[in-house]
Structure formats: C-alpha cells, structure tokens
Amino acid sequence: MEYVRGGELFFHLSRERVFSEDRTRFYGAEITLGIQYLHQLGVVYRDLKLENLLLDEQGHIKITDFGLCKEEINFGDTTRTFCGTPEYLAPEVLEDNDYGRAVDWWGVGVVMYEMMCGRLPFYSRDHEVLFELILVEEIKFPARLSEVSKSVLGKLLEKDPSKRLGGGETDAEEVKTHIFFESISWDELYKKKIAPPFVPVIKSEQSADYFDKEFTDENPDLTPPDESDPKAHVGDGVHFHDFTFVPEAGGNFK
C-alpha cells in the first residue's frame, strides 16, 4: 500500500480553517477528474469526504478508500443501498430512492463548501435533524464568497439529482464547463503540469508531520497471521514462520 505523506485534506483544513477560492478551485478540479475517471469505468464512489482526500508529496489530490464503491453504474443506472457518511449523504439517498452517480457530485459540492466556508453546509449532532436539514434546508453562504463560487456550490448541492450540476448524461463535462473552473486548463491539470497551491514539506520517507498525533502516537498493532490458512503452517520443518509461500512439487529455484 502506498504511503501518501501529505496527509488528509481534513488535517490541512483543520489547521487553516478555510481555503482560498483559488486553492479550492485546484482541489475541486482534481477531484472532478478523479470522479470522472471512476464514472467512465462505471463506478460510483459514494463516500467523498475530506478524510478520504489525501495530498501526495507534490501537493496533488489522491482519492482513497474505495470500500463503498458500486460498479456497473452508468448514466441511467441506479442502486439503492443506504451507505456513506451521514454529513455527506445526498438527499436522494436519505429518501430511500433509487439513486445514480449524481450522488458523487453532491459529495464534491459538500467538500468544496467545507473548503471555502470552513464548515459543513448542513450539520447537527442529531442525525434525524441532520437528515431533515439535508432534505429541506436552503443552503446558506458567507457574504465574502464570490457569486461564481456561490453558483458552483449551489448547483452541486442541488437537491434534485436530475437538475444537479454533473447529474446529466455528460456527467463531469457539466462541472468542468462551469464558469468557476474557467481558468483551469483541464489537459494541463490531467498531466499534472499545473503547480499545486500548497506543497508539503517532507523531511523523510517516514515523515508523519501531516497526520494528527491522535493517530501517530498510537502503538502499532500488527495483524496476526491467518490461522485458517492451511499454507501458514506446513509440516514441522518450516524455517520461516508465517511465511506462506509453498513451492510446487518438484519446483526448483534458479
């Protein structure tokens, strides 16, 4: 598994409170390319949140944790599994309706709102209240946000998935052509030729400076070997315990 030393976007936003519109534009654009790639493969992600967005050593976005992905979902296809992180759930998921890939564009809207506003668009510790807010509450914006930023967030956080930015057949192309992203050269961005707005300072290969001490101060807990694996213990003369490779009969090493 690759170690992504730049840490979670959640960590960086927690330290800086808000990101500028330009910095949000860069991250939002890279996230959009990632979601577009998944959708082209027929995969809906379903768990977009700041904790699942990491920065690599150059400051580029990496989307992680694909445990809730659903395959074979193209335009017009739907699923209905209730899953995801409460604060990021799209209205159509809460309504127990069949939903499609537009849920991912709602997620893009939530994380971009967090970046520019420093808070979630809808929040309550009581999940019933939270879900009601997501379903019926009108989105509110800080007065300092530009009209263009309000526009892209409002369109991504449209409660009707059929009217949501990205919810149509052209998917990510709707998002990429919004005026908020007008300054982005998508081809240059795809080739990583646009300099990220922030580059992590990596002191060593083992550097953990961009991870919360709540996690890095924990003692490592090694996963024990699988006792149910018949290859884990072969005969009485095993020289390397827990090394599961068993050569084929008559096999030779060269």
Image (cartoon, grey):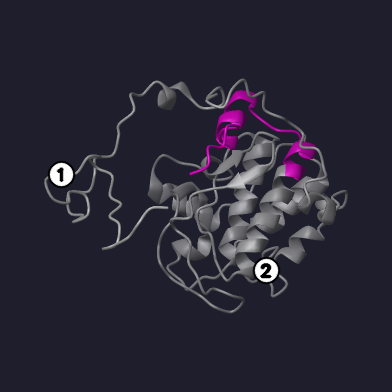
Q: Which amino acid, by three-letter code, is at mark 2?
A: Lys
As drawn, which residue projects farthest toward the left? 236
Residue beneath the point at 42% across and 68% down: 96
Residue beneath the point at 52% across and 25% down: 206
Q: Quadrant of residue 140?
A: top right
Q: Is disc 2 placed on a helix, strand or loop? A: loop
Dot 1 corresponds to which residue? Answer: 237
Res. 163 visible in picture: yes
Question: Where is residue 126 shown, x and y percent of the image?
Answer: 39, 43
Q: What range of the chain is rendered magenta?
A: 1-26
Rate crowding at label 2 as few (under 14), some (14 to 19) or many (20 or more) other CA atoms within 10 Å: some
Q: Is there CB contact under 8 Å for labels 2 and 1?
A: no
Q: Is residue 25 magenta?
A: yes
How far is disc 2 from disc 1 in space, using C-alphas? Answer: 66 Å
Asked whether, in this view, residue 21 is left or right of residue 60, the answer is right
Q: Nearer the viewer, residue 76 or 53?
A: 53
Q: Which mark is residue 163?
A: 2
Asked whether, in this view, residue 127 is left or right of residue 75, the answer is left
Question: Where is residue 83 shown, x and y percent of the image?
Answer: 41, 58
Q: 24 above or below 98? A: above
Asked whether, in this view, residue 164 is left or right of residue 189, the answer is left
As drawn, which residue projects farthest toward the bottom? 76
**Earlier-in-chain disc, 2 versus 1:** 2
Asked whether, in this view, residue 182 is left or right of residue 107, the answer is right
User: Which tag is nearer the camera, tag 2 or tag 1?
Assistant: 1
Q: Which amino acid, by three-letter code, is at mark 1?
A: Gly
Q: 215 above or below 98? A: above
Question: Where is residue 24 shown, x and y percent of the image?
Answer: 73, 41
Q: Is residue 105 magenta?
A: no
Q: Is disc 1 placed on a helix, strand or loop? A: loop
Q: Nearer the viewer, residue 254 or 34?
A: 254
Res. 138 visible in picture: no
